[in-house]
Image: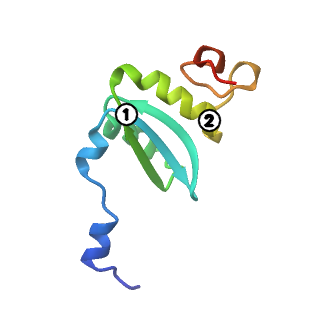
Amino acid sequence: MELINQNQIIEKSISYDSIKKIGIYFLIKDKQIIYIGQSINIHNRLSHHSSRKQFDAISIIECNPDNLDELESLYIHAIKPCLNGNGKKGEKNAPFNRRELRIE
């Protein structure tokens, strides 16, 4: 087994503060977004997901708490991740449906 060097470790790092942020998070498995969620404390929320670890990477978009529902819904409807489940009429479960967001 070969160890990676310090520079490689640092290049792959993300700021610890970035996972404490308010925003939308994306769980990624094999370079595919499999789940989209929101939280006012992403670090705490991810600890719930990690107990059922089905992902190998995360991405985070910070946003204002007042925009969480709308932004999460837009991403869910645009990307259609497999683990967000389906609601009425085959739409993905999201705080707002496509009609409420005025998207086709």
Q: Secondary structure at mark 1?
A: strand
- The residue shown at (32%, 74%) is 8
Q: Can you identify the residue that label 1 sits on? A: 23
- The residue shown at (30%, 70%) is 9
Task: Choose top left, top right, bottom left or bottom right for residue 94.
Answer: top right
Instruction: Please determine whether, in this image, residue 11 is positioned above or below residue 72.
Output: below
Which corner quadrant holds the N terminus? bottom left
**What colour-coding does the image apply?**
rainbow
Is 32 left or right of 104, judged from the image as shown? left
Is 35 left or right of 22, judged from the image as shown? right
Residue 11 point in image, percent of width and height: 31, 68
- The residue shown at (48%, 34%) is 37
Q: Secondary structure at mark 2?
A: helix
Identify which amino acid the numbered label 2 is placed on.
Answer: Ala
Identify which amino acid the numbered label 1 is placed on.
Answer: Gly
* Residue 52 visible somewhere in the drawing: no
**Looking at the image, is mark 2 or mark 1 earlier in the sequence?**
1
Residue 96 point in image, percent of width and height: 56, 18
Task: Choose top left, top right, bottom left or bottom right for residue 3.
Answer: bottom left
Q: Can you identify the residue that label 2 sits on? A: 78
Instruction: Please determine whether, in this image, residue 1 is positioned above or below residue 56.
Output: below
Instruction: Please determine whether, in this image, residue 47 is positioned above or below residue 103.
Output: below
- The residue shown at (61%, 25%) is 93
